[in-house]
Amino acid sequence: MKGFVFHSPGNSAWEEVPDPAIKDPTDAIVRVDQVTICGTDLHILKGDVPEVRPGTVLGHEAVGEIVEVGSDVRTVRPGDRVLVSCITACGRCRSCREAAYGQCQGGGGWILGHLVDGTQAEYVRVPYADLSVHALPSTVRGQDAVLLADIFPTAYEVGVLNGRVRPGDTVVVVGAGPVGLAAIATARLYSPERIIAVDLAASRLEAARRMGADAVASATEAPEQLIADLTDGHGADVVIEAVGVPESFEMCTRMVRPGGHVANVGVHGRPATLHLEDLWIRNVTITTGLVDTSSTPMLLRMAAADRLPTASLVTHTFPLEQMEEAYDVFARAADTGALKVVLGGQRHDTLAVPTA
């Protein structure tokens, strides 16, 4: 089969790779029908995630069909259409028993496309399948469902829930990429007074308006002053950082009100300065986190009820074999207008299952 392989920073390719096989009785093999590219994948290609070994197939989000399961898998079977979660959960360790699946201590957590081969391939081996794949309702399209593998759970859990968005709040989302836009959509579930989006790109600010932002601001035009003007000088109740660079994080800490919350969602490849000399006296709460995907079943139900605006996030689609072109389009989002790129939608040849 073919997969998108990371070799070194700046060096990756869509190429022949070995077919995945069942290694443990809790594994499942999934034929990939739809897959997408995440901003974290771009961080890997830049060398910001050194744990990723050369030769690893990237990707941690997919929709597909079960083609084989291990002897201990109970909740899915061959032929089932499933969502492959970005987080793998053993279900037995202390973290998993507390639904903190992202911190799984039993060999799970974020491993796909990170510590083991991922989903940007024709087939993928999914460890601990019973808790790491989700059966898809027949009414949810694969192109929509793939956005629930990572983007929407991350925005909702790490941004909205960690930020403790409440009715009547002023919420600022810094970064109107896919995760930031999903944060706008899911923050609206809590009836804030206003949501303000901040970004560098005019196209993304327009997308933020379509997603439900009440106001937008360019990151280059003193957005802190706009927030102060809109809140009578108090600052925002919740600021969600969805970029992952030091400058955006520090901007968030300047926008938040005393007693407010900064929820950092972005993946940072460089250190950010934490100005405790200013923040300590303002009672500011700062949270970080890796998504647990504990909200995925609920989000799937909402998608099936047409309560999540997933379709508006997909701006580009490609056949799976055009992975390199899709990466180029996604990496040049400022020029291409790309928000979320989805690949696939076509059936593939039967997987050659080893006989020994």
Image: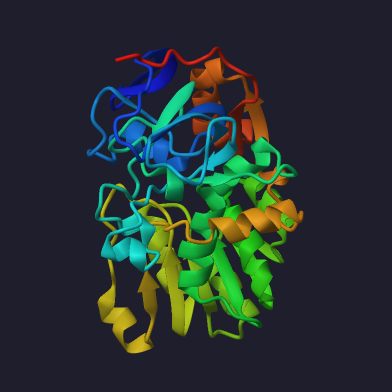
Q: In which quarter of the view is residue 112 placed?
A: top left
Residue shown at 65% from the left, 52% from the top? 205
Figure check: 114 above or below 5 = below
Residue shown at 39% from the left, 62% from the top? 249
Please provide percent x and percent y for residue 148: 57, 48
Q: Tell whether 58 sits left or right of 138.
A: left
Figure check: 130 above or below 302 = above
Figure check: 66 above or below 96 = above
Please provide percent x and percent y for residue 289: 37, 61
Q: Tell whether 36 sits left or right of 1.
A: right
Please provide percent x and percent y for residue 252: 45, 67
Residue shown at 56% from the left, 59% from the top? 221
Please provide percent x and percent y for residue 196: 63, 66
Q: Tell whether 148 sits left or right of 282.
A: right
The answer to whether any part of residue 86 appears in the image is no
The N terminus - image quarter: top left
Figure check: 74 above or below 10 = below
Q: In which quarter of the view is residue 226 placed?
A: bottom right
In-front residue for pair 33/135: 135
The answer to whether any part of residue 157 appears in the image is yes
Q: Tell whether 107 sits left or right of 351.
A: left
Q: In which quarter of the view is residue 254 placed?
A: bottom left
The C terminus - image quarter: top left
Residue shown at 49% from the left, 32% from the top? 331
Task: Give the mark count.
Answer: 0
